[in-house]
Image: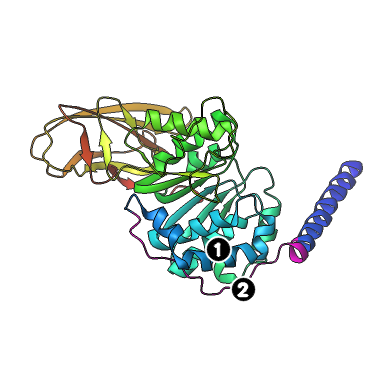
């Protein structure tokens, strides 16, 4: 027992020394520039030409000089020009939530936080599994107003997306560049993307992200690209540094459809932790005619666990808002046990069913950690 106690004591002492050394290195080697006013061009981010307008503006050149000369760029893997573009887009989008997959040493994270600080609202959710130990020490060097704009997740993207309960209008994907992992990140990000939101994918000169983006767009034709990087494929050049069409970057930008759409292929929504299921509400666009098929998978996490399924068929004829009510409300099979609802939807109609926003369920709880 004494030997084990001494071993644990040495282990924790070693961790303490390591953390102190990392804190010292971060303080000396990873400083942050002070908060200053950074100019940005005002554009219509819904326009197909918004990126071209940003790059051609005089404000972009001024902002680019700030990010190129700042200390943060020396610890970044993303170009200063890319960071300036992200800053300009975020200033115009003014999102409540921005997501970054792949923090590394928080260089681009800092640029994004500067944009949200200047907006006066919003949070950057940034995810890093590999060098996660370094990130809190680096963020600690930032001015306090920037620190308030970031939430760090020391985990891989699968764990993050599994517990993510936000909608984001700006998602930057710069994680594992293998095809399968990059494609997963895009598919998972699409589930939390807001209508008309932007997904930015880095390193498309590399085959993994590039061909993953091609596959994603093939499988999700309602998404569109800003620019022509994905169509800029030169046969016989699988490793192509000239692939990106946004000058000075290695990224492509995809835009989510401006509405939530349903057809005959079932679409699932992220499971929600709930106290009970009282109703599901949807808001159609136009005057669709057809039948909405709804399936709810209800899971009560007790001992033993209980799984149930409830289905509804709803005829929609006039396009009015629909409230699918459960009376009495559906409650956990075991009182006070954790209870989740997984929603699936399918549509039978001559045309796809367009919704103003994703379906909503009441009564949901905040997910643990959100």
**Residue at the image position 42 percent from the left and 65 percent from the top:** 41
Q: Is residue 85 above or below residue 331?
A: below
Q: Quadrant location of residue 256? A: top left
Q: Tell me what residue is drawn at x 78 percent, y 60 percent.
A: 25
In the shown orientation, is residue 33 left or right of residue 6? left
Q: Residue at x 35, y 56 (%)?
A: 45
Q: How is the image coloured?
A: rainbow
The label shown at residue 64 is 1
Q: Residue furthest left?
A: 318
Label 1: which secondary element: helix
In the visual, does 3 lie left or right of 87?
right
Q: Nearer the viewer, mark 1 or mark 2?
A: 1
The front one of 120 and 82 is 82
Can residue 40 be found in the magenta stretch? Answer: yes
Residue 350 vs 100, above or below: the answer is above
Q: Is residue 352 above or below residue 72?
A: above
Of all residues shown, which one is farthest toward the right? 3
Which badge, 1 or 2, comes first in the chain's sequence? 2
Q: Main secondary structure of the magenta part?
A: loop
Q: How many marks?
A: 2
* Label 2 sits on residue: 34
Nearest the viewer among 51 and 348 is: 51
Q: Is residue 149 visible?
A: no
Please give the range of residues in magenta: 26-45
Q: CA distance from mark 1 to mark 2?
A: 16 Å
Query: Does residue 289 show up?
Result: yes
Across and down, in percent, residue 166 comes to 42, 49
- The verdict on residue 31 being magenta is yes
């Amino acid at each position: 027992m004494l030997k084990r106690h001494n071993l644990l004591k040495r282990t924790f002492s070693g961790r303490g020394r390591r953390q102190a050394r990392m804190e010292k290195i971060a303080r000396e080697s990873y400083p942050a520039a002070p908060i200053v006013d950074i100019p940005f061009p005002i554009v219509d981010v819904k326009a197909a030409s918004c990126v071209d307008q940003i790059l051609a503006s005089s404000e972009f050149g001024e902002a680019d000089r700030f990010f190129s000369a700042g200390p943060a760029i020396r610890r970044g893997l993303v170009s200063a020009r890319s960071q300036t573009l992200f800053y300009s887009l975020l200033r115009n989008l003014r999102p409540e939530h921005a997501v970054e997959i792949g923090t590394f040493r928080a260089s681009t994270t800092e640029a994004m936080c500067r944009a949200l600080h200047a907006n006066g609202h919003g949070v950057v959710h940034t995810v890093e599994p590999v060098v996660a130990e370094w990130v809190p020490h680096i963020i600690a060097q930032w001015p306090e107003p920037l620190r308030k704009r970031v939430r760090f997740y020391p985990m891989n993207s699968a764990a993050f997306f599994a517990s993510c309960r936000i909608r984001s209008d700006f998602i930057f994907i710069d994680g594992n560049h293998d095809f399968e992992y990059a494609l997963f990140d895009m598919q998972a990000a699409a589930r939390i993307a807001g209508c008309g939101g932007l997904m930015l994918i880095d390193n498309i000169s590399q085959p993994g992200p590039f061909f993953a983006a091609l596959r994603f767009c093939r499988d999700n034709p309602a998404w569109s690209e800003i620019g022509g990087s994905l169509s800029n494929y030169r046969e016989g050049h699988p490793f192509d540094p000239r692939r990106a069409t946004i000058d000075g970057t290695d990224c492509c930008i995809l835009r989510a459809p401006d509405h939530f759409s349903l057809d005959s292929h079932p679409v699932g929504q992220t499971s929600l932790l709930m106290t009970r299921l009282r109703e599901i509400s949807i808001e159609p666009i136009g005057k669709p005619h057809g039948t909405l098929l709804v399936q709810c998978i209800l899971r009560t996490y007790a001992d033993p666990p209980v799984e149930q399924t409830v289905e509804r068929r709803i005829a929609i004829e006039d396009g009015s808002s629909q409230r699918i009510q459960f009376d009495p409300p559906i409650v956990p099979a075991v009182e006070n046990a954790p209870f989740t609802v997984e929603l699936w939807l399918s549509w039978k109609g001559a045309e796809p069913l367009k919704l103003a926003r994703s379906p909503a369920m009441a009564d949901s709880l905040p997910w643990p950690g959100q």
